[in-house]
């Protein structure tokens, strides 16, 4: 059986079911919301596995599921050298959000990454420690800031509401996912005038390390045919 992992709840699950349904593949959850399996009709040999969006990159990398739907931000953040571990088959056109860097509105002289770099240097000279940026996306943010020459900062982990860390004095700036910016504005934060760290959306991925021999490969070919997608190299 080909194991297909999809988000287990909320709008991501609903939009995933809708996306496949529009292409002739019907999905439904088995039983109540506490059931983490489902049924697939329209392609033979496919088992539906319901997981949190954050678990799906790990399960793909481990080869425990053959295919999965999750945000491109989660795959890039959680999987080092992600192109060696998964193949992105197609963007799905929903779940859009930007990973951005935001600072307090009161920082009137900080609008760009160059301004942030200068502010970070001044902050360290004044306070004796590096400017703190709260985020859940350490890998992506670190790479982005390095590529753009920003130094004298430290990333601090945020497990809760990242936007509240500045108000709570546990960080001076944040890097977080946003779709509308409303929560940022409510917390008196502004997005820097620069390209986002990453523009995320839901993607359909295939696991390079899964066992594709026999029935899973047959199901993959049938699914790709139904979805109108080419078979990727190496599968």
Image (cartoon, rainbow, N blue to C red):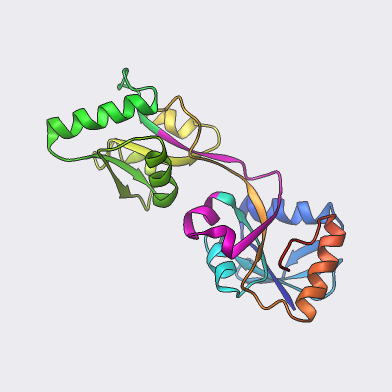
Percent from the top left, x then y, of residue 26? 82, 62
At x 62% / y 53%, what residue is drawn? 10
In-front residue for pair 129/165? 129
Residue 144 position, x and y percent, is 43, 41
Residue at image position (30%, 48%) is 156
Q: Confirm whether the magenta stretch covers residue 116.
A: no
Quarter where residue 222 is shown: bottom right
Extreme residue in the bottom direction: 214
Rendered-image quadrant of the N terminus: bottom right
Q: In this view, does 141 lie to the left or right of 15?
A: left
Q: Which of 126 and 164 is in front in this view?
A: 126
Residue 202, percent from left and from top: 64, 50
96 vs 12: above or below:
above
- Start and end of the magenta stretch? 73-101
Is 93 within the magenta? yes
Viewer-closest of 226 and 83: 83
């Amino acid at each position: 059986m080909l194991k297909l992992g999809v988000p287990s709840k909320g709008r991501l699950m609903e939009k995933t079911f809708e996306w496949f349904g529009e292409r002739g593949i019907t999905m439904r959850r088995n039983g109540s919301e506490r059931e983490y399996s489902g049924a697939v009709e329209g392609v033979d040999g496919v088992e539906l596995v319901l997981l949190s969006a954050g678990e799906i990159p790990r399960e793909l990398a481990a080869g425990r599921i053959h295919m999965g739907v999750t945000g491109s931000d989660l795959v890039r953040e959680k999987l080092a050298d992600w192109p060696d571990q998964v193949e992105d088959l197609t963007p799905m056109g929903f779940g859009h959000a930007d990973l951005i860097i935001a600072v307090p509105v009161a920082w009137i002289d900080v609008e760009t990454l160059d301004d942030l770099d200068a502010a970070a240097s001044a902050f360290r000279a004044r306070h004796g420690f590096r400017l703190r940026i709260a985020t859940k996306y350490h890998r992506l943010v670190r790479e982005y800031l390095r590529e753009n020459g920003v130094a004298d900062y430290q990333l601090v982990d945020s497990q809760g509401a990242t936007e509240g860390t500045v108000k709570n004095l546990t960080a001076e700036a944040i890097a977080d996912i946003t779709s509308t910016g409303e929560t940022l504005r409510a917390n008196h934060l502004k997005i820097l005038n620069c390209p986002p760290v990453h523009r995320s959306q839901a993607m359909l991925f295939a696991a390079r390390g899964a066992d594709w021999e026999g029935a899973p490969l047959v199901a993959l070919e049938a699914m790709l045919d139904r979805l109108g997608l080419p078979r990727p190299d190496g599968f």
